[in-house]
Image (tube, helix red, strand yellow):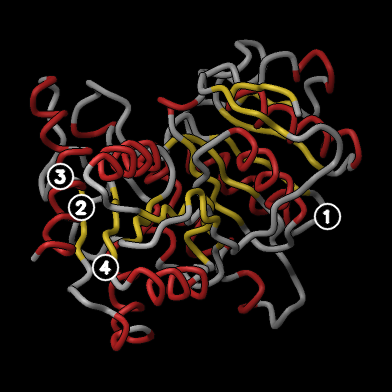
Amino acid sequence: MKELSMRAALREAMTEEMISDPSIFLMGEEIAEYNGAYKVTEGMLDQFGPERVIDTPISELGFAALGVGASSNGTRPIIEFMTFNFAVLALDPIINAAAKMLAMSGGQFSCPIVFRGPSGSAGQLGAQHSQTFENWLANVPGLKVISPSNPADAKGLLKSAIRDNDPVIFMESELMYGDMGLVPEGEYIIPIGKADIKREGSDVTLISYNKMMKVAHDAADALAESGISAEVIDLRTIRPLDIDTIVDSVKKTNRCVVIDESWPFGGISSEVSYQLQRRAFDYLDAPVLRVNGADASMHYAPNLVENYLPSVHRVVQAVKSVTYG
């Protein structure tokens, strides 16, 4: 094992895959000469040259569409968005072309492309730069959606995403690029569609993904001080959702709280709650509760940012309400 930052783990995954497969290229804003807005692609221009690490104009619609076309013609593009907030401009080629390519061509054209970049709040960035889009894109048949929480998972899942023949949305966090973690040495991949039990427990299941996993872990620590044993599940992949791991955990703990940064209406937490009442209703000793971001636009003021996001306190209160009634 070796210790790497999240950005270094992502870079290592892309570098290894680009060395082994010359059809892979990387394209996005400031990724080449500037080494990436978050330095994820640092040094890759020098290693692979401007034909495979390509700076683009500030035109998400344009370079996303170019990547979709290239992926249907024998290449495997990795498209970096500086933030998925900007990728809203590229939803047409992502949803109406990439996601539908295989079905609309009767299986004649696949679309092996990865769209990656940060999603969600990154502090005081205001309403237009703090949105979480996992649930938007997971709603679309034909797309796979991944949202890792640590460097090891990020590397293994990104390698799987690059090798996948379907379009994959790979959603990171600006606040986690500097996070350090142990990463296996040598070749390894993590299968898409498999959640991970990060902490065993017996009294309640906490479910989350991406940077909200930090809230889940801290809440589990706080609950342990009160004698409550929390099992913590990292979804890792949003679509396809590993509902079997979730159901098996809830059959053991009989209670569940889902922590989801996105707006509460129609979010990932809503889908998890529905699946649990459908598949594990008889095992639940209390309703499934959700701890979401506020049902409002994010504001700039630090106190409003704090109040907007899920917190350890809110998770602990939710757990105590399902355990103590």
- Residue 5 lies left or right of residue 212; in this view the side is right
- Amino acid type, label 2: Val
User: Is the C-beta separation of discs 2 and 3 under 8 Å?
Assistant: yes
- Residue 272 lies left or right of residue 194; in this view the side is left
**Residue 137 figure quarter:** bottom left
User: Is the C-beta separation of discs 1 and 4 under 8 Å?
Assistant: no
**Of all residues shown, which one is farthest toward the front?**
227
Disc 1: which residue: 74
> Going from the N terminus, do you reach mark 2 or mark 3 first?
2
Look at the image and tell me in which quarter the N terminus lies: top right
The residue sitting at 49% across, 65% down in the picture is 96
> Going from the N terminus, do you reach mark 3 or mark 4 first?
4
- Amino acid type, label 3: Arg
Disc 4: which residue: 270
The residue sitting at 45% across, 47% down in the picture is 90
> Going from the N terminus, do you reach mark 2 or mark 4 first?
4
- Amino acid type, label 4: Ser
Q: Of circles 2 and 4, which is in front?
A: 2
Disc 2: which residue: 291
The residue sitting at 10% across, 20% down in the picture is 301
Q: Of circles 3 and 4, which is in front?
A: 3
